[in-house]
Image (spheres, helix red, strand yellow):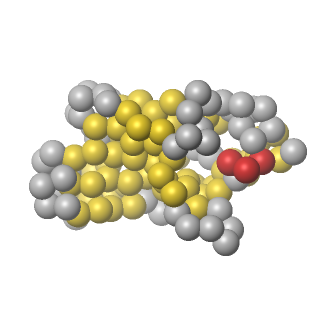
């Protein structure tokens, strides 16, 4: 089993910053990548940022240049530094882990980010 524990999130004014963190535990050995997804009311869950063990990253166009994903050396812990936040960034943010060889996905419980205008 895999557990993903997210911390951070909260309420911030537009233009402000927040940092999310996610710690993976359990049976987490194997080739994997980790990511942040988000889902806002009435919309589908979307990829925000992704990182692999080599540190290669991928960002949604809407957050590129404002958000930065980082990881520890073992890819058991990731963070998402969010700057210049906008009201449209308001969503529940989910930590995600994928085991590449087994093609299995896990999500955390999610953490709310609210950006007021």
Is 1 positioned to the left or the right of 11 in the image? left
Is 41 positioned to the left or the right of 76 in the image? right
* Number of marks present in the image shown: 0
Q: Position of residue 54 (x, y in %)?
A: 24, 29
Q: Quadrant of the N terminus?
A: bottom left
Q: Position of residue 84 (x, y in %)?
A: 71, 31
In the depicted view, which residue is nearer to us: 83 or 56? 56
Q: Position of residue 103 (x, y in %)?
A: 20, 61
Residue at x 62% of width, y 46% of height = 9
Residue at x 65% of width, y 62% of height = 40
Q: Is residue 113 above or below residue 86?
A: below
Residue, far bottom: 42
Residue at x 52% of width, y 43% of height = 60
Residue, far right: 117
Q: Quadrant of the C terminus?
A: top right
In the depicted view, which residue is nearer to us: 66 or 70? 66
Q: Position of residue 63 (x, y in %)?
A: 59, 38
Q: Is residue 81 visible?
A: no
Q: Is residue 10 above or below residue 94?
A: above
Is 45 positioned to the left or the right of 29 in the image? right
């Amino acid at each position: 089993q895999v557990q993903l524990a997210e911390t951070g999130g909260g309420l911030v004014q537009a233009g402000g910053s927040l940092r999310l963190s996610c710690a993976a535990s359990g049976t987490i050995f194997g080739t994997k990548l980790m990511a942040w997804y988000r889902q806002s009311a009435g919309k589908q869950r979307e990829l925000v940022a992704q990182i692999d063990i080599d540190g290669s990253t991928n960002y949604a166009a809407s957050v590129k240049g404002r958000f930065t994903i980082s990881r520890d050396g073992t890819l058991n812990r990731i963070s998402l530094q969010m700057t210049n936040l906008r009201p449209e960034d308001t969503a529940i943010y989910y930590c995600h882990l994928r085991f590449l060889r087994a093609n299995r996905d896990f999500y955390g419980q999610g953490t709310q980010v609210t950006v007021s205008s």
